[in-house]
Image (spheres, rainbow, N blue to C red):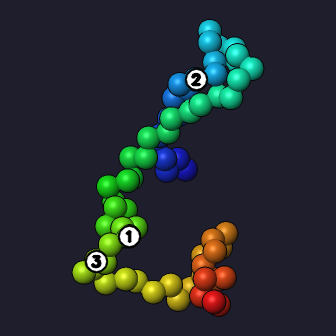
Amino acid sequence: MKIETDHAEIYTGVRHGKSLGSPIGLILPNKDFENWTTKMSSKSVEEEIKKVTLPRPGHADLAGVQK
């Protein structure tokens, strides 16, 4: 199952398919950015915040709920 369709673009550190020995820089555009601008905003929002009642495996939900 393939969820993400994003592709990384090499913008530094590689020439003609070989590493230059310097750090390699990649750009990975976040196509899902627009869906999260309101939810992750530092400003107060009118939208209701959903509480996490069931921790998701592999996430920090359990530790966050316990604090």
Q: Residue at x 61, y 83 (%)?
A: 64
Q: Earlier in the sequence, mark 3 or mark 2?
A: 2
- Residue placed furthest toward the left: 46
Q: Which residue is mark 1?
A: 42
Q: Which residue is mark 3?
A: 45
Viewer-side residue, 5 vs 42: 42
Give the quarter of the figure containing the C terminus.
bottom right
Q: Residue at x 62, y 9 (%)?
A: 16
- Residue placed furthest toward the top: 16
**Label 3: which secondary element:** loop
- In space, the residues marked 3 and 1 are separated at their CA atoms by 9 Å
Q: Amino acid at mark 2?
A: Thr
Q: Amino acid at mark 1?
A: Ser
Q: Residue at x 64, y 22 (%)?
A: 13
Q: Is residue 34 above or below residue 21?
A: below
Q: Residue 1: give x, y in percent of width and height.
A: 55, 50
**Label 2: which secondary element:** strand
- Determine which of the numbered discs, if any, sits on residue 12 in the image: 2
How many numbered discs?
Answer: 3
Q: Is residue 8 above or below residue 30?
A: above
**Label 1: which secondary element:** loop
Crowd class of label 1 (few under 14; some 14 to 19; many from 20; radius 10 Å): few
Q: Amino acid at mark 3?
A: Val
Crowd class of label 2 (few under 14; some 14 to 19; many from 20; radius 10 Å): some
Q: Residue at x 67, y 69 (%)?
A: 58
